[in-house]
Amino acid sequence: MRAARNGSSEILGQPRGRIMSGPAITKRVLISGQVQGVGFRAWTQDEAEMRGLSGWVRNRRDGFVEALFVGPPDLVAEMVETCRRGPRHARVQTVETIYGEDLPATPGRFRILPTA
């Protein structure tokens, strides 16, 4: 067992929040605005883990934040809406869904990836 950032615990790689069950969807989004240098990636990871989602988030060199969410449709939709607010110091302009890619819905931990 290891301590998580918000003081809760994580046991054997299980997410802190809800456990994913049923069919999963995958949604990839690009977030624009003042979204780098304001804790957006760590905040996204915390929010996704609270919902039991897997996937990843990363900064992009073009100034966007990019995220991939995998989980139950209602929780993925909730997470995308949550990204429209962002953390306290962020100023989100747009959250755009990226379509046209066949993305596998693979469960696992939600990770912060290096800048791409």
Image (cartoon, rainbow, N blue to C red):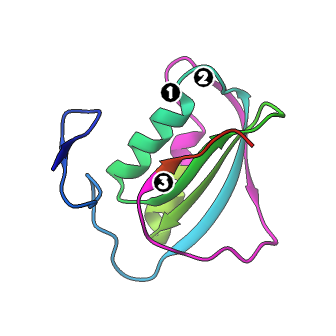
- On residue 23, which mark appears? none
**Given the current orientation, which residue lies at the most extreme top position?**
89
Q: CA distance from mark 3 to mark 2?
A: 18 Å
Where is residue 77? Give x, y as percent: 53, 59
**Span colored in magenta:** 81-110
The quadrant holding residue 19 is: bottom left
Dominant secondary structure, magenta: loop
Q: Residue visible at 66% across and 25% down?
A: 36
Is residue 105 positioned above or below 85 on the image?
Answer: below
Q: Which residue is mark 3?
A: 78
Identity, as a three-letter code, of the amino acid under mark 3: Glu
Residue 25 falls within the magenta-colored stretch: no
Q: Is residue 79 left or right of residue 22?
A: right
Few, some or many C-alpha atoms within 10 Å of disc 2 (few <14, some 14-19, many ≥20)? some
Identity, as a three-letter code, of the amino acid under mark 2: Ala
Q: CA distance from mark 2 to mark 1?
A: 6 Å
Q: Which residue is mark 2?
A: 90
Q: Residue visible at 33% across and 77% down?
A: 21
Few, some or many C-alpha atoms within 10 Å of disc 3 (few <14, some 14-19, many ≥20)? few
Where is residue 89? Give x, y as percent: 55, 17
Q: Residue visible at 25% across and 52% down?
A: 16
Which badge, 3 or 1, comes first in the chain's sequence? 3
Q: Which residue is mark 1?
A: 87
Where is residue 41? Give x, y as percent: 54, 35
